[in-house]
Image (cartoon, helix red, strand yellow):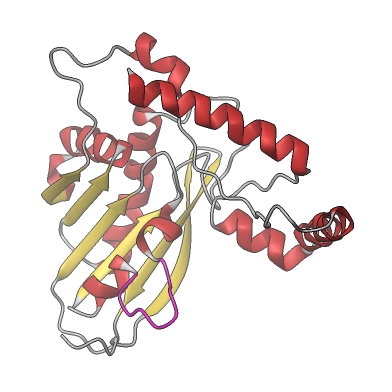
Amino acid sequence: MTQQAVETRGAEYWTRKGEVKLFLWRKRAPGAAAAGAIFFVHGSSMASQPTFDLTVPGRPYSSVMDWFAARGFDCWTMDNEGYGRSDKSRPVNCGIENGADDLEAGTELALRESGAQKLLMYGISSGALKAAVFAQRRPERVVRLALDAFVWTGEGSPTLAERRWCSRRSWLCVLAPAAVPANILQRMHAEMGKALQEADIAQSLRAAGIAPALLGPRELGAFMCAEHEKWGRVVRE
């Protein structure tokens, strides 16, 4: 296929797991021959849309959902509890078992709306664990299962206790050259603070599963030093 992307259309859906409200996202290409329904399961670093439906101007098919939709697949994904646009109110660990419970509710909706008999399911990183647990529970809903970057827990792998100190999170920051005057840095900091309070910006960040934090130069420097030391230890060990 050429780099000219086929037009796809997205639609949001909502379902519930008890009192927990869960967000689903669907992508299809109008008029494409039906090739099956795929359900994408995200990991622990990012929510569903930035993982599977990333849009980059000038780069068609940065979105894996667009790529498969253009080939006739009915593409689905969801934000697990604690991620993206799904509920984050319960004081619980949103781990593998909980994620598999989310898939119970999400796949029921996807099967009903798509008309598919079974789903193709793809899980990445800890999403692979969620997908595997769900497929074991509900084999009648899954026709094919793809597990990517599956977390290794075999003989000789670190125990959960050994890994606990090394919790992982992704972060982004804005930096400026060292020679930028202090008054300019202060103004940049103030303007970014104002921008983060804008309703549309805050909503877009939340939809992407991002929790913004406004740190000054000293606080950010201390944070980056701590991260450097933390992950340097991972590499050295």
- Residue lying at the far front in this picture: please name it: 179
Residue 129 relative to residue 8: left or right: left
Residue drawn 20% across the image and 52% down it: 121
Instruction: Classify residue 85 as left or right of residue 123.
Output: right
The reply, left or right, for residue 69 in relation to residue 225 is left
| Residue toward you, 223 or 59 | 223
Dominant secondary structure of the magenta stretch? Answer: loop
Magenta residue check for 215: no
Question: Closer to the camera, 235 or 128?
Answer: 235
Instruction: Please identify the quarter of the rendering in which residue 35 is found.
Output: bottom left
**180 to the left or right of 212:** right
Q: In which quarter of the image is the N terminus?
A: bottom left
In percent of width and height, residue 165 lies at 46, 16
> Which residue is located at x 20 percent, y 45 percent?
148
Which one is in front, 143 or 199? Answer: 199
- Number of dots carrying numbers: 0
Q: Quadrant of residue 101?
A: top left
Asked if 74 appears above or below 231 in the picture, the reply is below
Of all residues shown, which one is farthest toward the right? 183
Q: What stretch is highlighted in magenta?
A: 54-62
Extreme residue in the left direction: 143
Judge by depth and name the residue closer to the eye, 189 or 55. 189
Q: Was residue 60 drawn as part of the magenta stretch in this picture?
A: yes
Residue in the picture at 29% in, 54% down: 40
Can you give x and y, in whole percent of width and height, for residue 237 in the image? 32, 17
Q: Where is residue 133 in the image (x, y as percent from the top left)?
A: 23, 32
Up the image or down, 230 lies above or below 43; here it is: above
The residue shown at (13%, 45%) is 140
